[in-house]
Amino acid sequence: MDLLTTPFLTGTANGAILLMAALGLTLTFGQMGVINMANGEFLMVGAYMAYLTQQVLGTSGLSILIALPVAFIIAGLLGLLLEVTVIQWMYERPLDTLLATVGVALVLQQLAQDIFGAQGDPVTAPSWLGGRLSVFGYEWPHRQLFTIVLALTALGALSALLKYSSFGRQIRATVQNRQLAETLGVSTRNVDRLTFFLGSGLAGLGGVAIALISGTNPTLGTAYIIPAFLVVVVGGVGQLKGTVIAAWVVGVATAFLTDRTSGSTAQVIIFALVVIFLVIRPQGLFTVRTRSLA
């Protein structure tokens, strides 16, 4: 039983991190057709915000709770800065956004290495996250449970925002028909900026969860950016429900394969399976009319 339980529970926690990384990507890619390869570095920024907050406040239980809004705001502002200075000049040119954001990612990695060093720093979990929950003989760390709760909370908040708020309706209108939304008075330029802020901030939250599990590292985002894009494509661009399902499947499948092979082999197998799936169903699990698919 433990041979099945361990990768299942660990994979669910990893899927929660992928979900927080992919939520931002599915918004920006689905709405603006932007391939943001720097989104992984916003995860890294969130991780370092958790580290810095803990350096200021100590390892008390409040440090992680305060790190969450700090990471969201700082990563969101960096995403907004990226949109204003680079991305806004490259709409309708997704390959250019890919190349430009790869360059931005490398710059952010080097900057983090210059400031914090190449080895990375640990983040101590507070006492209320230091325990374990016994599940079918497997001692499931509270840190992984926290990651899942955080991802579900972020998903619920984002879903409520999109469904019930005026800003959410503007996002959905822009995704479905940008030109028509503009004729109805929607400032799609502001929507783009706020969406980029929101998506980058969600990645920052994911970085806090990563810091609790594996600490900080200038290159930690590179381990998540490709799987996050796979999640977005498999789930269906711009579809939250597809993103949730795909994140969980990719996370659990990767954990099962890693438990039986090496991590690199697991990634190759997952990538091959995703390619086969997209050959069979290129639109992903669910479809939505977006500018990127027009």
Image: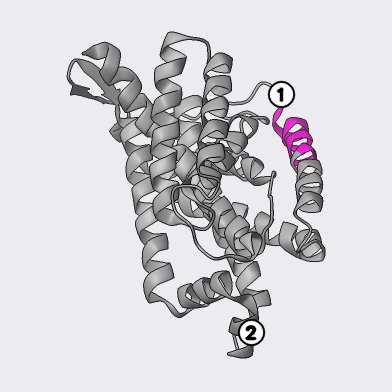
Amino acid bearing label 2? Glu
Please name the residue shown 76% across and 64% down the image: 91
Quarter occupied by the N terminus:
top left
Q: Depth check: 173 or 112 in front?
A: 173
| Residue displayed at 74% across by 57% down | 82
The spot of residue 119 in percent (x, y) is 66, 21
Q: Tell us which disc is closer to us: 1 or 2.
A: 2
Q: Nearest the camera: 95 or 165?
A: 95
> Residue under circle 1?
118
- In the rendered view, tell whether residue 85 sits above or below residue 171: above
The answer to whether 254 appears left or right of 106 in the picture is left
In the current view of this chain or complex, which residue is farthest to the top?
261
Up the image or down, 59 lies above or below 155; here it is above
Residue 16 appearing in the image:
no
For mark 1, does the 10 Å Cα neighbourhood hold few (<14), some (14 to 19), or many (20 or more) residues?
some
Q: Is residue 289 magenta?
A: no
Question: Magenta part of the protein: which range?
Answer: 106-117
Secondary structure of the residue carrying tag 1 is loop
Query: Does residue 259 lie above or below 169 as drawn?
Result: above
Q: Residue 154: percent from the left, percent from the top? A: 40, 53
**Magenta region includes residue 107:** yes
Q: Report which residue position mark 2 lands on.
A: 182
The answer to whether residue 244 is left or right of residue 191 is: left
- Does residue 188 appear left or right of residue 148 in this picture? right
